[in-house]
Amino acid sequence: MNQNKVVMAGAGVMGASLAQVYALAGYETYVYDLFEAGLEKGKHLIAINQEMMVKEGLITAEESKGALERMVFTMDKECFRDCCLVVESTVERMDIKQGFFREISEIAPKEALLATNTSGLHITEIAEACKCPERFMGQHWLNPPHLMPLCEIIRGEQTQQPYVEQMYQLVKDRGKEPVIVKK
């Protein structure tokens, strides 16, 4: 498992912004989407966000360039094979999220943290589809994550404390303010 590789699944507004959070923190950041058009949209959103952050003095042009160089946009599920973290930000449908995690929890390393950015679906119900549901939780960021500091870490019924602590530290190390909640 590559401790410096993360995958953001879904290249929409949240996935693109989350990719920035991790890439700016130095992670090799993969942005996965099912469609080339989704990836192109994600690239466009990131370009706009990075330009604004440089213009506002939030990051330097060099930091922006470095973050962009650490991002890989892909439709290849092999990107999940050796990552340490997967954060899913796809459509808000239980069947879609369960199908995604049913497949990806088999591909990702068994030690990898798995998270959904859902804002309204039940974490425990999504986790029912996961292999090793004890490592699954919510990582719900306020929008836009690249600017907002708060991230809720949401425990499911089977989420085990060591994984929650790992996620808490991971988010805190990004300069963000994690809050642990149970849904």
Image (cartoon, rainbow, N blue to C red):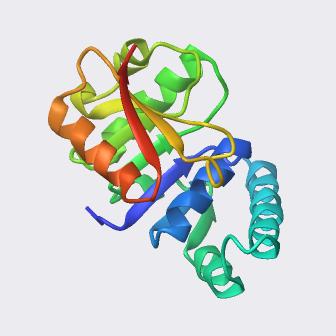
In percent of width and height, residue 2 lies at 30, 66
Q: Quadrant of the C terminus?
A: top left
How many numbered discs sit on the rendered protein? 0
For the point 66% across and 75% down, the residue is 59
Hey, which quadrant is residue 65 in on the image?
Answer: bottom right
Q: Relative to 27, does residue 163 appear above or below in the rendering? A: above
Residue 78 visible (yes or no): no
In percent of width and height, residue 30 lies at 53, 61
Q: Relative to 106, does residue 59 appear above or below in the rendering? A: below
In percent of width and height, residue 108 lies at 33, 47
Q: Quadrant of the N terminus?
A: bottom left
Q: Relative to 53, does residue 99 appear above or below in the rendering? A: above
For the point 63% across and 33% down, the residue is 90
Hey, which quadrant is residue 60 in on the image?
Answer: bottom right
For the point 67% across and 39% down, the residue is 143
183 sits left or right of 55 in the view: left
82 sits left or right of 66 in the view: left
